[in-house]
Amino acid sequence: MKFVSSNYYTLHVLKKAEPRLRKAIVSNCNKKLVNCLSECFLNVLNGNIQLSVCNMGKLNKHKSAIRKVVDRHVPLWQVETHSSE
């Protein structure tokens, strides 16, 4: 939760941004933002955040990239290259 609260405004910008700007932000993010996003993804994977069937379908095609972001044994440079896809 501490990563989410410290990056609240960045997450808000990511939510409101167009896809092109979102890709630019994520591709140039720092380690703190990657940790924040991985914490959010982990909550989704654990079922702590309720998603609709439509949203789960949208995330289904990205599940390997989401799992790679959450995995702590994957180096940061690999996470950054896959998160921009």
Image: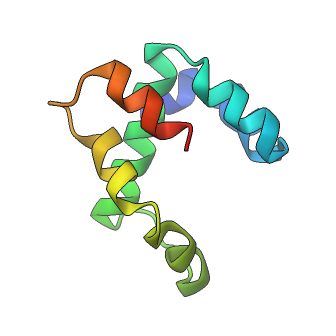
Tell whether 83 sits left or right of 71. right
Residue that extends furthest to the top in the rendered view of this protein: 30
View extreme (left): residue:
73
Q: Quadrant of the N terminus?
A: top left
Frontmost residue, 16 versus 18: 18
Q: Residue at x 37, y 31 (%)?
A: 79
Vertical relation: 72 (above or below) 33: below
Q: Is residue 70 left or right of residue 62?
A: left
Q: Residue at x 45, y 27 (%)?
A: 80
Residue at (38, 51) in percent of width and height: 66
Q: Position of residue 19 (x, y in %)?
A: 78, 46
In the rendered structure, the answer to whether residue 38 lies left or right of residue 54 reads left
* Image position of 37 (left or right of 76): right
Q: Is residue 76 visible?
A: yes
- Residue extending farthest to the bottom is 53
Residue 51 coordinates in the image, percent (x, y): 52, 74
Total numbered labels placed on residues in the image = 0
| Residue 58, image quadrant | bottom right
Horizontal and vertical percent position of residue 28: 61, 17
Q: Is residue 64 above or below residue 79?
A: below
Which of the 4 quarters of the picture holds residue 54? Answer: bottom right
Image point (19%, 32%), residue name: 72
Looking at the figure, which quarter contains the C terminus? top right
Is residue 2 visible in the rendered structure shown here?
Answer: no
